[in-house]
Image (spheres, grey):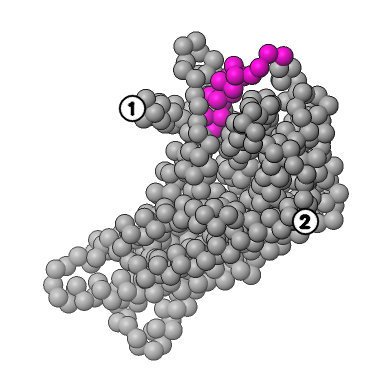
Amino acid sequence: MRAVGTVLVLVVLATLVATGARRWRIPAPSLLVIAGLVVALIPGTPPLHIAPQTIALVVLPPLLYASAEEMSLRDLKIVWRPVAVLALGLVLASAAAVGVLAVALTHLTAPMALVLGAVLASTDPVAVTALGRRLALPGRVQTMVQAESLFNDATSLVLFKVAVGLAVAASAVSWPKAGGEFFLLAGGGSVIGAAVAALVALLRGRTADPILETVVALVTPYGAYVLAEGAHTSGVTAVVVAGVVLGRSGYRLGDARIRLQLQAVYSVVVFLLESVVFAIIGLELPTMVRDLPPGSGAWPLQALALAAVLIGLRVLWVWPLSRVVQPVEGAASWRVAAVVTWAGTRGVMPLAAALSIPLVADDGSVLPGRALVLVLTTAVVVFTLVVQGLSLAPLVNRSGLALEPQDTAREQEHARQRLARAGLAYLDQLADLDAAPQAALERVRLALDARLRHSLAQDLRDPSTEQASFLHVYQQLRREVIAVQSTELQGMYDSHQISDSTRRQLQHDLDLEESGISVSR
């Protein structure tokens, strides 16, 4: 009963804070972490302990899946080389640098320092996506930082398992075995994720019930995660691959009503989970600090040093990379490097990994340094979410990379005109073939010309058989025109004429229009 009350309090707190964040134009994750810290420091607040399985199994799969679905596969194909360099090389370099610094600054043993390095090595997809939603970044830059955070988990997870094995068993590292485990985790997770995506696409393609489609969509990330973990591969990779594959073909699965319902349901789920989990990060830090052993009072300075090393190393790694591969044509490399560097925040994933560190070693003794690793991890996460999160938007605006609202509006308006012309061309073909009544064609043409989607249906509600038949033809024509426009929209996206955000926005508009036709039947 207490757990239920805690969850309800967290939901209420997170909803209030997230609402304020939108009004004040402050990144919600940053404000939620601050709110969690403030609440935890209030005298009488009970300590909060979250089981690692709760975050890893309940929270992560849907958030990772939503982040992967939002990613543009088209842009990913362009920036996959720098993403691979960051997801592999930078993770290894970050883990090594943090491990060496932790040995020098703390009392951690070398294996536990390596555990800390593996935990903090990768950026967090949940935090990166949540912070990036409100930034008008160019599509390729957004895809670059988002894809890096999604695909570097396999690397850090292998390092984490190797480091934990060293810490609990004090055994030697078998690097060939570690390399094989990496390919098993990443490759096996990718195969399972692709298989789950294919199965889900088959099921959703044959289902017309919105409730069943919603259930399938909600179960998909959990199914991919559980199947992959049960096969001893990477559940995170499986969820990411399934999300990317289904996100690419999602507009073809189901009709407009189903897509709109899925968007609404997932928006609520993502909002609640993101809000609660970022509040938990702030709430847990004071509790972890209280559990520290004596002599650990220097942890704030140690956490700052670790965060500085992570940021500095990221600058050294990203700067030359951005000069070689420029994701934005005509933009100065230092501007791209600055944004990509500062967008590399830590978040939920490192916290979940740190919480999963075993309590005891193989010989039954208490694992030394676990409490300090938890505190340093959480402190670095809080630092990046607050400092980098609050300053990321001003940095993007000063860099000149942010897309201007008028440019986005101009692109969307141009795309809408292209869609209207495609619909009119289809009507001309039907008129030449005498495939439909001229009156129905003219009404559809008028709707396209004037962009009056729903008002025409008000004039077509005569109960007579003739009018009912006419209404049926009219609605069928509108659906056919919308299908032509959806195909034209996807063609414009595939040929790089519009951005992914424009494609999603206009597809949403077409779904709303088609849904309105369905309601008026």
Question: Is residue 448 visible from the viewing direction of this image?
Answer: no
Q: Is residue 324 above or below residue 277?
A: below
Q: Which residues are magenta?
A: 278-295
Q: Is residue 290 magenta?
A: yes
Label 1 – label 2 distance at C-alpha: 48 Å
SS class, disc 2: helix
Question: Could you tell me which quadrant the C terminus lies in?
Answer: bottom left
Circle 1 residues within 10 Å: few <14, some 14–19, many ≥20: few
Q: Image point 60% across, 19% down: which residue?
A: 291
Task: Give the percent coordinates (x, y) of residue 106.
Answer: 77, 24
Question: Is residue 242 visible from the viewing direction of this image?
Answer: yes
Q: Is residue 24 left or right of residue 118?
A: left
Task: Give the percent coordinates (x, y) of residue 16.
Answer: 44, 28
Q: Is residue 352 magenta?
A: no
Circle 2 residues within 10 Å: few <14, some 14–19, many ≥20: few
Q: Is residue 3 left or right of residue 28?
A: left
Task: Give the percent coordinates (x, y) of residue 12.
Answer: 40, 28
Question: Could you tell me which quadrant the N terminus lies in?
Answer: top left
As rendered, which of 80 and 380 lies closer to the eye?
380
Give the residue type at disc 1: Met
Task: Give the percent coordinates (x, y) of residue 288.
Answer: 59, 22
Which quarter of the figure has residue 410?
bottom right
As rendered, which of 281 and 441 lies closer to the eye?
281
Residue at numbered disc 1 = 1
Q: Image point 50% across, 72% down: which residue?
A: 487
Q: Are marks 1 and 2 in contact (CB under 8 Å)?
A: no
- Residue 242 marker: none
Residue at numbered disc 2 = 176
**Going by the picture, which residue comes out furthest to the front?**
363
As rendered, which of 418 and 94 lies closer to the eye?
94
Give the residue type at disc 2: Pro
